[in-house]
Image (tube, grey):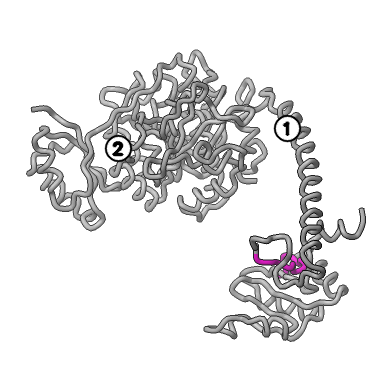
Amino acid sequence: MSRINLSVSVDDDHINRISEVVQNLKKAGMKVENLLDQLGIVTGWCESEKVAKVSQVEGVLDVESERTVQLAPPTSYIQ
Amino acid sequence: MNNSNLSTTQPETTGRYLVLLQEDAVEAGIQVLNESAGVRNFVKATQFEGSDVTADVVEGTDTLVFDSLGVAVVTAEPDQFMAMSTMAEGTSPIIAVEPERVVYALSDTGFNPPGQPVISGPSNLSLEYLRGYRDAIVNLVDNLSVTSESSEVKQAALEETELTWGLQITKAAESPFSGRGVKVAILDTGFDLTHPDFAGRQVTTSSFITNEEVQDKQGHGTHCIGTACGPRTPLSPPGYGVAYNAEIYAGKVLSNRGSGSDGGILAGIQWAVANGCQVISMSLGARTFPGQRYSRVFEAAAKRALRRGSLIIAAAGNESRRDMGRFNPVGHPANCPSIMAVGALDIGLKLGFFSNRGFDWRGGQVDIAGPGVNIFSSWPMPTRYNTISGTSMATPHVSGIAALYAEANPYAGPEVLWSLITQNSRRLMLPSVDVGSGLAQAPC
């Protein structure tokens, strides 16, 4: 069992009821950290076995596991 | 020059004239044409509502007014043409007058206008072809000699005594616009809030990195902000900022160690959109692999940002090694179709050897290119300045230019800004998979 950081997009039909979707995401096992109402996106994390359940919440468009970005060191010629 | 040569270089005209009228003053324009140039017999295209304006109509009337276009097609004598031209020079509802040209459908056989009889058979056709070919060669040679001269002049002019080469080659140096009244968000490692080159500037900040202030201890963010929004006349030249009067929104989504994640970047985008930033510059990204699809979540975010008035511009990424024949696809999230992806060029308008490539559109493509090799800009004090390379440096050039277009076109939404940037870019003899529509150019 491992924690997965998630970004969840909400479809256009549910964007005005996003707090409802957030409640259902929580019920499905997602720990919601940020509700980005301008973008219709919810970020947070869940246990890996809960991902499928989170994806099935009504109004959810896509669920992606979080990527990381890393700049080159500041002394590098290419940035 | 003989006559036959003239006929190939001058456009064929119909004897009629196209008169461009002010959009909101078509009626006044008609009146002026009538009173001052003696133009009569007006027929309006809107009178043919529901049916097309046919050739008979065009031929049979003196003056046909396409009211919705604000254009009149006028049959006029030379003295009437003179009168109309004079009016177009002063203040009148007439903006411009030009002879109507003869245009032909482009055809495969090409060298003979369709509808024009071939006078003496196929041998004449090939003579026409050869003449055209000769003219094209002469033209090509002329153009080539001009180009090599002017590029030498350019090279000499790109010394960075007053302004960086990036400002010069993008024409930002000559633009009358400065980004005044435009909000530009730079989502990066933050900003050196003590940098003397930005004293007195309007800067709004927010950190999306846990336990880290906006103050930039890495350098990258301060460098990118410098290119997008830095000064033109710092204490010691060269000037290096494109939109030097724009309002700066510095969002810290990358830590002082240069790392970040989707959640923080999305939170930064949300902050910039909520603050009404017309331009969001993101010199960041994660490596992708051929065949990998773009992020659906970031694409949804970018579409909604566009809907709310924000254009996101992001770095195509630096994972390629073109000198070794290695090409990497555009990185995440620049590979999203609704995010403008920027490739990097050097001072000779060659690609930066590191600049990524578009593989197929579902995996993301490069939309535009900007100066990204040996870019001078601000760096956290006490270092003050640094010269570095990357698509990270090309991106804020384009973002600054986007802010100039936003100022020049105050009612343009982000999709229109996108079009303006690509429409006005300088086309290059480089593959579009590498540079999109070419080198971004500032509005003039």
Residue under the point 36% across and 45% down: B302
Assign a secondary structure to mark 1.
helix
- Which residue is labeled 1 in the image? B151
Give percent across and percent down for residue B391.
Answer: 48, 29
Q: Quadrant of residue B213?
A: top left
- Which residue is labeled 2 in the image? B267
How far is disc 1 from disc 2 in space, using C-alphas?
A: 44 Å
Kindly identify the amino acid type of the residue bearing the numbered disc 2. Ala
Residue under the point 52% across and 17% down: B384
List the single residue furthest toward the right.
B2
The residue marked by circle 2 belongs to what chain?
B
Q: What secondary structure do most residues of the magenta stretch adopt?
A: strand
Assign a secondary structure to mark 2.
helix
Magenta span: B93-105
Q: Is residue B103 left or right of residue B375?
A: right
Q: In this view, does B157 lie to the left or right of A34?
A: right
Label 2 packing within 10 angstroms: few (<14), some (14-19), many (20+):
many
Residue under the point 16% across and 31% down: A4
The residue marked by circle 1 belongs to what chain?
B
